[in-house]
Structure formats: C-alpha cells, structure tokens
C-alpha cells in the first residue's frame, strides 16, 4: 500500500512539479447476494474489498482541475475548469470526476478551488467489481477533504450515483456507491434500498474464503442491456400498479407474485419480476444464514441466485456460466454466482481454503477449453470503505 502512494507521489511530482498534500483510497466491491434488486427497492448484501483506487491530490490556487490516471496514461493530464459542466469526448474517465463535482454542486456545496490529482486503480477495468464507483467515491473523498465539506456520507454516495445516472447515462441503483461509501473491514452491508436502512453484518467464514473469478471478457453492450432491464422492471411496475399497491417490485412477496403474475403482458416480464421477488427473498435468507454461520445454506442460495440471473433475468452469459457451473462442481465449493451487473465481469465462489488451488485448476482448464482464453482468480478480502488516507508527510516517498 505505501509503495502505491510512493509511486503516485513521484508521478505527481513529475507532472505538477510539487508534492501533493493528501492521500486517498476508495475500494471496489463484491456483491454476496441480491443482484439487480437495488433499482427495484429490494435488498442487497455487498462488501467493499481491499483492491481499489489510490489517489494523491492537492488544491490549486486557481479553478483548474488537472487529473492524471496511471490506468489511462495515453489520456495524459486532463484539464478543465471546476465549473465546466460539458462532457469530455471519447468516454473519458474524466467524466466520472466531472459528474461527481457537478452532483456536489447540485447539493449546494461550494467548490472553492481547482485541484491536481493522480490516481491508480488495481481493480481490473470492466471486471464488474465497480471500478467506476470506486473512482466516484475517491473523488467524493478528495472533494470532502480539499473543500472541507461537512456533508453526510449518504450525500457523497448519492453524488456517485448521480454522476453515473445523470452524467454518464447508466441508470444504476445505489448498491455500489453505498457499499464503497459505507464499507468496513470484515463486514458486509445489508441494505434495504427502499428505506435506505442498513446493517453492517460481520463476515465470519471460518476456514472458507470468497474467491473472485474474472471472465476477462471485454464488456460490450453492458450499459444498454443494463438500462433495458431497468426499463423492463419499471414497465412491470406500471402494469401491476392498478392491481397491487406497490411502488417497487422489491415490495412484492412470493405469494402475491403467484397471484398477480398473469397480469404481466409477456413471459419475459414475468421472468424478470420472478427474479426480483425471489432474489430479494434469497437475500434476506442469505443474511440470516450468514449470521447463523450456516455457510452451506448461504452457498445453496448463491447457486439459486445464479440460475435465476441466468434463466429469468438473462444477464449472465457463456463465460460467467462456465466459471460458475464448473466452480459449483468442485469439491469444497459451497456455492457460486455471478456478481455485479453481469454480461461478463466476475463471479464469486464460497470455497474451503484447502480447495482454492483445486478450484483454480479445474475452472481454468474447463474455461480455456470452452472459451479459448484464461480466467483470473483473486481471494477477496473485505476492507474499509472510501477514506482520506492521511497527509503526505515531508520526506515521502522514502
Ligand atoms: C451494477 C450497478 C448496481 C447494481 C448491479 C446489479 O453494479 O451499478 O447498482 O444494479 O449492477 O446488482
């Protein structure tokens, strides 16, 4: 971790000819269970992880923002005025920065100066571990510190979501930003996205670990497919509202789904709603299972979640299915499912620590034969949420 900041400070000095004042970190996230329920007023159960985005920054005396990412060195230093609300071309990563600043202004915050920022993320891009929300909350933390903003954490989280929805144009729910904003070491966030009530649940997996399996598939069309699911579920709400007193699909109980499913105009909508209703139920059960240290029951719910995402919500794909279904067949694996938006990205498996190597071997062999390239594996560690990581002290880097 210190080496990361040393590298960032050196690059900052090279680019801007002085030292930064402050260090920041913002994690990525996995979602243990509760997928695509967040924009449906349902429950989610994500956790922030120890990989994420590192940044060093300092205020400027003018109103220029100058940002550089070691992940996108070809973009060079991106510059814009702190008040400039126009989009940067070519889907630049700088738009996430602009989107968060715009959202902060929208809440009435005074952005009193420009700043310089160098970032480095170790979340694989497009892996579904939320590198974009990680960056958004990093920017939120930078702004909070440099502008001395006394704002509630929930507002920072909401600014990340606003950036995504209003500036980038993906109609995501709030799960990722919430997990990253509120994350804590060794705890997962159980969030009711309708009421925004949440509970931090200790993650005691004993001799089991969560392994992240990356499809390494290049993400294509994810955003349009994601927005399509958002529209489908909204349409289902409109169709059901004359018969049910609901605002969100996440309010529907299983019995009521059976009673009213016939009202929906197509089998596709019925499948979408069934996923939300059952996934929401599984999430509540999953939290109880983990609280009772019943990992076997949790693993079973993970498996059911994946097949619902594959068959009813149709957001999986050959790559994710190959990872998950092969993992499920490995001795020592209690459960496996895709995590995040889907269509590529990552899956997770709950696996005995003695079986990790076996899992990697069997899944790699099968994946390479069927898909033609290799997956990657990481053991997930649940770490702290986005935060200021201290001042840069004289003499750094050592
Ligand atoms: C993405 C979105 C989240 C959530 C998940 C699916 O990660 O950013 O809001 O909808 O997909 O659960």
Image: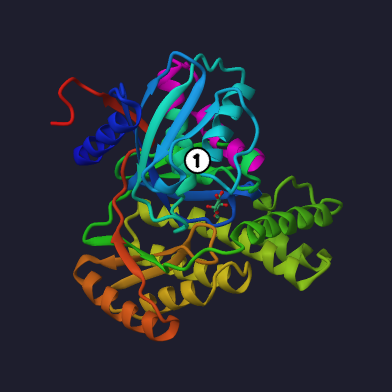
**Residue located at (56% from left, 33% from top):** 98
**Quadrant in the picture for residue 297:** bottom left
Residue 200, image x, y percentages: 40, 40
Residue 157 position (above or below residue 169): above
Q: Is residue 201 above or below residue 357?
A: above
Residues shaded magenta? 142-166
Residue position marked by numbered label 1 in the rendering: 177
Look at the image and tell me in which quarter the N terminus lies: top left
**Up-down relation of residue 21 to residue 204 (above or below):** above
Q: Is residue 393 left or right of residue 180?
A: left
**SS under mark 1:** helix
Quadrant assignment for the C terminus = top left
Write down the quadrant of residue 102 in the picture: top right
Q: Residue at x 26, y 32 (%)?
A: 9
| Residue 47 visible at all | no
What percent of the width, then of the height, locates residue 52? 36, 45
Locate residue 325, reporting x and y percent. Answer: 43, 78
């Amino acid at each position: 971790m210190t080496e990361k900041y040393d590298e960032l400070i050196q690059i900052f000095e090279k680019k801007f000819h002085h030292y930064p004042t402050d260090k920041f970190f913002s994690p990525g996230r996995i979602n243990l269970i509760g997928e695509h329920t967040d924009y449906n007023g349902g429950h989610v159960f994500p956790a922030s992880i120890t990989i994420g985005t590192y940044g060093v920054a300092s205020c400027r005396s003018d109103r220029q923002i100058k940002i550089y990412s070691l992940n996108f060195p070809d973009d060079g230093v991106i510059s814009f005025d702190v008040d400039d609300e126009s989009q940067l071309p070519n889907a630049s990563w700088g738009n996430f920065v602009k989107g968060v600043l715009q959202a902060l202004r929208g809440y009435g915050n005074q952005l009193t100066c420009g700043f310089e920022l160098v970032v480095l993320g170790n979340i694989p891009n497009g892996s579904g571990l939320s590198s974009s929300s990680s960056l958004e909350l990093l920017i939120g933390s930078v702004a909070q510190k440099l502008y001395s903003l006394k704002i509630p954490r929930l507002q920072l989280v909401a600014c990340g979501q606003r950036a995504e929805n209003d500036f980038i144009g993906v109609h995501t729910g709030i799960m990722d930003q919430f997990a990253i904003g509120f994350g804590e070491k060794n705890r997962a966030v159980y969030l009711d996205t309708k009421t925004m009530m949440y509970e931090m649940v200790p993650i005691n997996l004993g001799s089991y670990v969560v392994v992240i399996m990356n499809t390494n598939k290049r993400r294509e069309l994810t955003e349009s497919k994601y927005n399509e699911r958002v529209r489908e579920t909204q349409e289902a709400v409109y169709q059901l509202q004359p018969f049910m007193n609901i605002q969100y699909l996440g309010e529907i109980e299983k019995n009521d789904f059976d009673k009213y499913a016939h009202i929906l105009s197509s089998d596709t909508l019925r499948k979408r709603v069934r996923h939300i209703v059952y996934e929401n139920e599984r999430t509540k059960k999953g939290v109880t299972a983990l609280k009772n240290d019943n990992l076997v029951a949790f693993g079973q719910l993970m498996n059911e979640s994946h097949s619902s995402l594959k068959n009813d919500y149709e957001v999986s794909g050959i790559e994710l299915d190959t990872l998950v279904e092969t993992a499920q067949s490995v001795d020592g694996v209690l459960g496996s499912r895709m995590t995040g938006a889907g269509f590529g990205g990552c899956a997770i498996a709950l696996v005995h620590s003695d079986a990790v190597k076996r899992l990697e071997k069997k899944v790699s062999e099968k994946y390479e034969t069927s898909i033609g390239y290799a997956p990657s594996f990481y053991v997930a560690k649940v770490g702290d949420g986005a935060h200021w990581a201290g001042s840069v002290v004289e003499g750094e880097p050592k």
